[in-house]
Amino acid sequence: MRHILGAIDRCGELPKMNDDERYALKQCRDEGYVDGLEVAVMAGGRVVVEEACPKITLKGLKFLYPYRDWKFILPTTLAVGELAVIIVQTVVGRS
């Protein structure tokens, strides 16, 4: 799904897709990650895409580019490092 969303984000249009990629696009549409196109499943199971102007929604951008909360990650990493130093000092001090 990220492959399809990335292609739409880079080009602003749909790339040539195989059956699996069209199914992934259908999932993106169902999840609300992309808008501006119609996706239908034919009786034989083939996914057909009719595009007007494909656009990635805000939900799709959050899926494509996940946000990393550095305000949480950095202090946690420093705390774990400090804990490791305290453990090493304790073990060395007892020897």
Image (cartoon, rainbow, N blue to C red):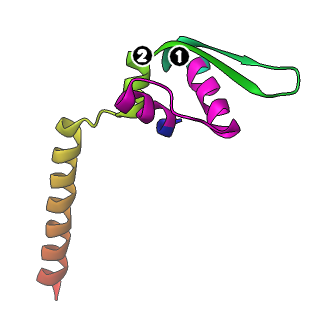
Along the viewing direction, whichever of 81 and 64 lies nearer the viewer: 64
The span shown in magenta is 4-29
Residue indicated by mark 2: 57
Badge 2 vs badge 1, beta-carbon distance below 8 Å: yes
Along the viewing direction, whichever of 10 and 68 lies nearer the viewer: 10
Q: Is residue 17 part of the magenta span, yes or no? A: yes
Left or right: residue 41 compared with residue 29: right
Vertical comparison of 91 with 21: above or below: below
Q: Residues within 10 Å of mark 2 (few under 14, many from 20)?
A: some
Residue 32 is tagged as 1
Q: Is residue 18 part of the magenta span, yes or no? A: yes
Residue type of the residue flagged with mark 2: Thr
Left or right: residue 34 compared with residue 46: left
Along the viewing direction, whichever of 30 and 84 lies nearer the viewer: 30
Q: What element carries label 2?
A: loop
Mark 2 to mark 1 CA distance (whole Å): 7 Å
Residue 23 coordinates in the image, percent (x, y):
67, 31
Name the residue at 30% across, 33% down. 67
Name the residue at 64% across, 24% down. 26
